[in-house]
Amino acid sequence: MKRFQYILFDLDGTLWESGPGITKAVQHALHCLGIEEEASNLTSFIGPPLNTEFQRRYGFTPEKSAEAIRIFREYYDDRGVYDNRLYPGVRDMLRKLYEAGIMVAAASSKPQPLIDKLMIYFDIGQYFEFTLGSNPADELKNQSGEDAKTKIVTAALTRLCALPEHTAMVGDRRFDMQGAVANHVTPVGAGYGYGTEEELKKAGAVFVAPDVPKLCSYLLAGQDD
């Protein structure tokens, strides 16, 4: 018997390495607002909603966060989104899960139009039942990363008609694990992404994969393996 019948994937830092495009776009937005930062210091922006991170890191007001996001989007949505690559082994993993009859969906805080672009760019959409991202119009309504991810996981489970006990949520940040725990699905950490093993385990991960092939083996294994 398969360990899981349904798998929800985060995207940034889990299936693809989106860091360079995101951090350069944040760097550009900050520069336009008079703040100079090295892109290497901005990896905390990969995963959580932008508005919460601008406020946490720089104490921006909601109005200033909105301006930062507007500038970020001007750069990222046309150029930065493609400064990105699949992690080694992802395409093979998705194919194996599909061939095993496991239903796969994406549950991401990334705006849906950008997910659609990248599914075409990487040519992996055929392996997904659907992809579920955020509504760009709601970007400024997020109060915390946990809140946003929990709602997206809930919506994905409902759309899949998935039983939580037969479902895994795979992600690289604590928000993904907390969203899984809140929905009573198995939290699985992508330890090769942008979060640490400590962060993932503290947030509830039952397994943290050091690379994609080991993640694939875990997801495909039987209950008694």
Image (tube, grey):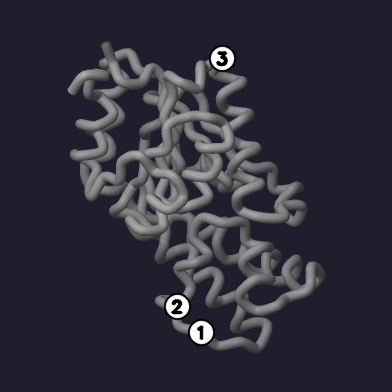
Image depth: mark 3 or mark 2 in front: 3
Q: Position of residue 152 (x, y in %)?
A: 61, 36
Amino acid residing under circle 3: Cys
Q: Residue at x 35, y 18 (%)?
A: 102
Mark before the other along the chain sequence, 3 or 2: 2
Q: Which residue is mark 3?
A: 161
Do the numbered discs 1 and 2 sit on residues whose CB atoms are within 8 Å? yes
Q: Quadrant of the N terminus?
A: top left
Amino acid residing under circle 1: Glu
Mark number, residue 1: none
Amino acid residing under circle 2: Asn
Q: Residues within 10 Å of mark 3 (few under 14, many from 20)?
A: few
For the residue pair 22 and 7, the one nearer the viewer reads as 7
For the residue pair 188 and 114, the one nearer the viewer reads as 188
Q: Which residue is mark 1?
A: 37
Spatial CA span between label 1 and label 3? 44 Å
In the image, taking residue 189 as reference, residue 144 lies left or right, namely right
Spatial CA span between label 1 and label 2? 7 Å
Instruction: Say what secondary structure mark 1 lies in.
Output: loop
Q: Residue at x 69, y 71 (%)?
A: 55
Q: Within the image, what quadrant is residue 165 found in?
A: top left
Q: Which residue is mark 2?
A: 41
Mark before the other along the chain sequence, 1 or 3: 1
Instruction: Say what secondary structure mark 3 lies in.
Output: loop
In the image, taking residue 130 as reference, residue 152 lies left or right, namely right
Q: Quadrant of the C terminus?
A: top left
Instruction: Say what secondary structure mark 2 lies in.
Output: helix
Q: Position of residue 192 (x, y in %)?
A: 29, 54
Q: Residue at x 56, y 56 (%)?
A: 48
24 relative to 3, above or below: below
Q: Residues within 10 Å of mark 2 (few under 14, many from 20)?
A: few
Q: Residue at x 51, y 16 (%)?
A: 163
